[in-house]
Each structure stands twice: as C-alpha cells, then as structure tokens.
Image (tube, rainbow, N blue to C red):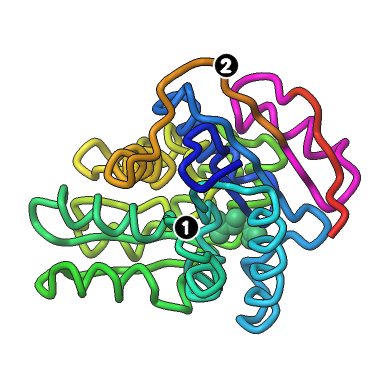
Amino acid sequence: MSVTDVSRPIGVFDSGVGGLTVVRALMERLPLESIVYVGDTARVPYGVKSVATIEQFTAQITEFLLQRDVKMLIVACNTMAAVAAEVVHRLARGIPVLDVIEAGAHAAVATSPGGRIGVIGTPTTINSNAYARRMHELDSAVRVYSQACPLFVPLVEEGWLDHQVTRLTAQEYLRPVLAEEVDSLVLGCTHYPLLKPLLREVAGADVRLIDSALTTAEFAARRLQQAGLTRGGGQPADYRFFVSDVPLRFQTIGERFLGRSLGRVEKVDW
Ligand code: DGL
C-alpha cells in the first residue's frame, strides 16, 4: 500500500481492553475507517507502572502498528499519552499522531464556562500532571483540580458499573474535586466512560463530563480530513484486534466496552 492510500487502517492502542471505548467512538463517528487495535493485556495495568517501563512498552506497540502500515496512530490509553506520547511522535515517521489527552484537554478548555476543571485518572496519569499542563498551555487562566482514582479500573472490569461499592468509591474520590466547585470533569482514563451514568449522579447535573473517547473520535475525523486521508467508501471497514495475552478475557470484557461483538481476536507476536 502507498502512503497516499486512504484505505489504510487507523492504528489504535491501549494497555488493555479500555481503549475499546475509543474504538467504539471511532466506529460511530468514522464508520468507513478500518481499525487495527492493540491491547497489551499481558502487561496491563500501566496506570501504576514507572515512566521508563511505559515508554518501553509504548515503543514496542508503536513499531508493531507501523509495520501494519497504519495511516494514523491514536494513543487511546491516557496513561501512555501522559508519559510516553513523545515516544510515539518520535517513531511515527510523519504519520499523524493523536492522543486522548490532547483531545480531552482541548474539549475541557473549550467547554468550561467558569474555567474550573476537574481531572480524574490513574495514579501515573495524575502524577504526570499532563492534563493540567496541556490545559494551561491552551488557557493559562483555567484552574485544574486532579484526583487519582485507582480503584475505578478494577471496578469497571468487574462490571460493577451501577453498584453501591462503586458509588461509595466515587463519592469518596470526587469529594475534594467537587468541593472546588468544578464546572467540568475530564474522564481521564479509558475505563471511565462506562461509569458516566454513575459519575453524573455523584457529580450532579451542573458538572459537565468530558468523555475523551468521544472527543478523540471528533479530533480524528478532523485530522483525517485535514491530511486528505479520509476514506470515502468502497469495501466495508475492516477491524482487527490484537492482544498480548491469550484473548479469552479480552473477548469477554471487550464486548461490554465496545457495545458490540468483537469478532476474531489475535495474539500478537512482538
Ligand atoms: N488504559 C489506562 C488509562 O487510560 C487504564 C488501565 C491501566 O492502568 O493500564 O489510563
């Protein structure tokens, strides 16, 4: 395939199953685009790992996707985007690179009337301060209040999306952020869009929830168009899913994240 061939797939990657929330948003926003997804299920979670380790894993996944001749790279994992986006840009060989933090930060700054923004994510994402840094670059006047929510990832993978334990956990985590009277809350982790109904209930109707999966799909549509890479039609979109561990758990949990059947899941051979 040549670099001008718009039928090439978009490469999307995450530490595991969570990036399927981004794939779901992409499938809805860009139904003609083919996607190759990589979930590093053998090494998840990334959210509690060191920067050096995450950089090394990110480089490996990026190379894998570049070998599959993708036309765009989307870092769907907030943790990778927070600490290893540079690695992806460095390796990308001119291919457009998008990440959930860039998209989420833009959306938050653009749609927070009072400029008081809460951010929730994994410990590595929050400790990196990547969201706050990016938002301050976009608008130095915004106030950002961040909170790590390490228990949300296992609770979502357990399927406890409307469970009393999750509700109490959310009340506890969100208390300090809500005390700052934020007008929007960035869901800075792949898993959190599944908690939207519960978080809306805990945060209250006045707090706008920023879903970085949706904003990333919107960003991707714009970037493809700017780069002249939008696929017009022809064959139906093709979806391929690669994981680094045996696919069984990914298959089961993944369909909840994707909202539809996954089809065949392949094991990567790095
Ligand atoms: N995908 C990660 C994120 O968005 C959550 C899971 C993990 O810790 O690896 O931050």
* Quadrant holding the C terminus: bottom right
Residue shown at the point (61%, 33%) measured from the top left: 257
Question: Residue 78: within the magenta?
Answer: no
Q: In the rendered structure, find residue 190 and report the number of the disc placed on it.
A: none
If you read the primary sequence from the N terminus, does the residue marked by circle 1 or circle 2 appear first?
1
Residue 17 percent coordinates (x, y):
68, 44
Say left or right for 262 vs 127.
right
**Residue, disc 2:** 235
* Contact between labelled residues 2 and 1, with CB atoms less than 8 Å apart: no
Write the start and end of the magenta stretch as one range: 241-262
For the point 50% across and 29% down, the residue is: 33
Disc 1 residue type (three-letter): Ile
Answer above or below: position of 160 versus 237: below
**Which one is nearer the viewer's eye here, 173 or 87?**
87
Point 34% across, 60% down: residue: 102
Q: Secondary structure at mark 1?
A: loop
